[in-house]
Image (cartoon, rainbow, N blue to C red):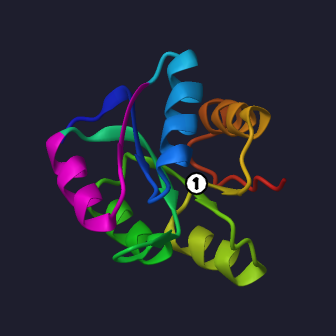
Amino acid sequence: MMTDSNKVLIVDDELDICYLLSGMLKQRNFRTGFVNSLSDAVIALQTDTPALLVLDNHLPDGYGLDFIPYVKRNYPEIKVIMITAHDGASERKQAYDGGVDLFVAKPLNRKMINDAIDKLYSSDAAGRLAFAM
C-alpha cells in the first residue's frame, strides 16, 4: 500500500491536542487527519495510509504502546511519533522496542513538534532516533 508523503494521522483522545497538532503540522505543509481511538486508527490507516503517525499512549480502547507493533508489522513504511504524558523509562523502552521512531513527552509546544519533525525527516532512516526533551 502506498503512503502519502505529506499525510499525518494523529491518534489522540484529547480534541484540543488533535487541533493543536493539526494546526502546527499544516503550517509545515502536511495534510492532517485525526481520530480518537485505536479502532478508528485501524480504519484510517486502511483508508488513507499516512507517512507519519502521531500516537498518544492512553486511549479509550487501549494503549498506543501495544498498537505500535501492529503499525510496524502492517505498515512498515510509516514513521511513528509517540506522544504521552506518562514519560517513564519503561514506556520509552517499550516504545522503542516496538518500533517507534521518536518519543515526545507531553505537554507539547510548537518548538518540540518542529524539532521532532526536523529530526525525523533529517535522520538516517536506518537508525532509530533518541529524542529527549
Element type at mark 1: loop
Residue 61 appears left or right of 13: left
User: For the residue marked with disc 1, what is the amino acid?
Assistant: Asp
Residue 91 drawn above or below residue 42? below
Category of crowding for the residue at label 1, using alpha-carbon neighbours closer than 10 angstroms: few (below 14), some (14–19), many (at least 20): many
Q: In which image quadrant can residue 111 be found?
A: top right
Closer to us: 1 or 62: 62
Range of magenta residues: 31-47
Q: Which residue lies furthest to the right in this view?
A: 133
Q: Is residue 33 magenta?
A: yes
- Name the residue beneath numbered marker 1: 101
Q: Quadrant of residue 20?
A: top right
Q: How far across and down, in percent of the image, does residue 76 sit? A: 35, 54
Q: Can residue 28 be seen in this view?
A: no
Residue at the spot 70% in from the left edge and 83% down from the top edge: 90
Residue 42 percent location from the top left of the image: 23, 60
Quarter containing the N terminus: top left
Q: In this view, does 78 lie above or below 87?
A: above
